[in-house]
Amino acid sequence: MRALRLLVMVPLLAGLATTGSRAWADAALLMEEPFGNFGSFNPTGHAAVYLDRVCAETPVRLRLCAPNEDGVVISRYHKVGGYDWIAIPLVPYLYAVDHVEDIPATADLALETSLRDQYRREHLLDIVPNTTTAEAHGEPPPGDWIQLVGASYDRKIYGFQIETTREQDERFIALFNDRRNVAGFNLVYRNCADFSRNLINVYYPHAVRRNFLVDLGITTPKQVARSLTKYAHRHPGLDFSTFIIPQVPGTIPRSHPIRGVVESVVKSKKYVVPLAILNPQLTAGLAIAYFTDGRFRIPKGTEKVLLPDQDDDKQPTASPAAE
């Protein structure tokens, strides 16, 4: 029964409710913490962009949203359907369900896996099809497609929102619908953070740049956030704010702190100690680079929200699921 399978979000919503009346506007970089074994090895995390007036006609074709639609999260993925980018509606992207009232208050790995595969079977079979008999009979397929939905079960997410106009959204939609959408992921020079950097620069040219000092020229989610924040500070007339989407409580392991390239070396004993022994001058240079231009923290007092597109006093409220 649905009521037994899913717990409503009332306790979490109550904990996240804050006072205020400002609306979360229009485009938001999502800087997502790393998780799992790969996240321990590569702590740079994931980057995506949320657009609240852009919706998905299909996961690979965009349109303007109709009233009461929540927008999409767009990102670049590794070997998912042969596409370079995929757009997923906000609530499924974060929680792998279609409706806010179906978001579980807690989650374990079994529930996470079930919700993701259920959403895939209902909405994403054209991109992530069943390719084996086991998958056709209920086994979820392997692969990075799991990053398309349910991100908040695995990660804490930091948002950096900046205003856009309808005209900018229309131009973006026309541009991306007209482009070839063919996979070209590369971890070093064509990764998810590169995609987010280029997307934001469609709205605000040259707003986000690489940092050859603290990230060795590799675009990282933290650098995109740092660069966008600096751009907003240089343009105080723009509406800019931050928010945090907490990782869903439960038994799923917590995500790891997000770091840049040089920061990963400087803050990790397993890297910095051997490097300091082998090349103390290089180690000192990396440390100077990090302390000069590599430190970046989320502003104190940043609000925790369930969804980033609602007025603080209009965050969705859940009602008990029907039995």
Image: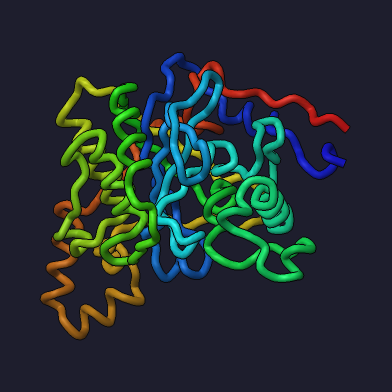
**Depth check, front residue: 321 or 40:** 321
Q: Tell how many labels.
A: 0
Q: Is residue 308 left or right of residue 153?
A: left
Q: The C terminus is located in which quarter?
A: top right
Colouring convention used in this rendered image of the protein: rainbow
- Taking depth in this image into account, of 247 and 50 the one nearest to the observer is 50
User: Looking at the picture, how far across and down is residue 193, in whole percent?
Assistant: 32, 53
**Residue 198 coordinates in the image, percent (x, y):** 26, 46
The answer to whether residue 221 shows anywhere in this view is no
Question: Considering depth in this image, is 246 or 207 the residue closer to the camera?
Answer: 207
Residue sitting nearer the eye, 68 or 46: 68
x and y, in percent, of residue 162 in the image: 31, 29
Q: Is residue 249 above or below residue 174?
A: below
Q: Residue at x 38, y 27 (%)?
A: 26
Lateral position of residue 288 relative to residue 201, left or right: left
- Residue that extends furthest to the bottom in the rendered view of this protein: 278
Tell whether 314 sits left or right of 60. right
Looking at the image, residue 279 lies above or below residue 169: below
- Residue shown at the point (47%, 46%) measured from the top left: 60
Whether 271 is drawn above or below 181: the answer is below
Q: State which quadrant residue 16 falls in.
A: top right
Residue most extreme to the top: 21
In the picture, residue 168 is in which quadrant? top left
In the figure, is residue 32 to the left or right of 111? left
Q: Residue at x 33, y 66 (%)?
A: 186
Residue 133: x and y, percent? 75, 70
Residue 19 visible somewhere in the drawing = yes
Quadrant assignment for the N terminus: top right
Residue at 69 percent across and 45 percent down: it is 106
